[in-house]
Amino acid sequence: AMRLHAHAYRAPSLLPLPLQYHDLLKDVMKQQCTRCGTVPAEPGICLLCGTLVCAGSECCYNESRVGECTQHAIACGAGCAPFLLVKQCLVFVIRHGSGCRHQTLYLDAYGEEDPYLKRGRPLTLNAERYARLRQLWCSHRLHAEVARANHRMAANMSWESI
């Protein structure tokens, strides 16, 4: 008789994030990339598993010049994964060589985004935005979001290098 292993079921989810953005910055800015061992110039966090990657840096390209975010999305998310670019406070979704920018997860006291952290205001995790991203991931609709965003945008960006 076949015997199945008893494993606890864990519902799909995203990485728990700190409420305050400065806590995330403080934790991430000195961490090293697991692939190349350096502190990334542009640290990215996989929101599926929490792995820190070098976003857009040549140090972690593979032999086909595919960037670490794309490589990690293939390994971790079956080709599709959201990443938080920490120094920019931006979320990108990478999907099989393409991608799109997703709405920022951290907002200031007025409910406004601070992309690239230009204004320097304290930022707090927006639970509704993170819940929406989590719902897109759990319902397998991130692929469609990327396709829809790329259809709207005429920009030709090389997403594989990220």
Image (tube, rainbow, N blue to C red):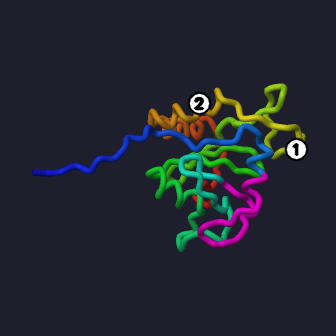
The Cα–Cα distance between marks 2 and 1, rounded to whole angstroms, is 25 Å
Q: Are marks 2 and 1 in contact (CB under 8 Å)?
A: no
Looking at this view, is 47 or 30 the one in front? 30
- Does residue 83 lie above or below 145 as drawn? below
Give the quadrant of residue 40.
bottom right
Q: Which residue is mark 2?
A: 131
Q: Secondary structure at mark 1?
A: loop
Quadrant assignment for the C terminus: bottom right
Identify the residue at horizontal 77%, vertical 48% (top origin): 88
Residue farthest to the left, as pictured: 1
N-term-proximal mark, 2 vs 1: 1
Q: Is residue 32 above or below residue 75?
A: below
Q: Give the residues in magenta.
A: 26-44
State yes or no: residue 83 in magenta: no
Local crowd size for mark 1, using a 10 Å CA cut-off: few (<14), some (14–19), many (≥20)? few
Looking at the rendered structure, the kind of residue marked 1 is Lys
The residue singled out by tag 1 in the image is: 118
Element type at mark 2: helix
Q: Is residue 33 magenta?
A: yes
Res 117 → quadrant: top right
* Residue at position x 54%, y 74% in the image: 63
Name the residue rendered at 38%, 41% in the picture.
9
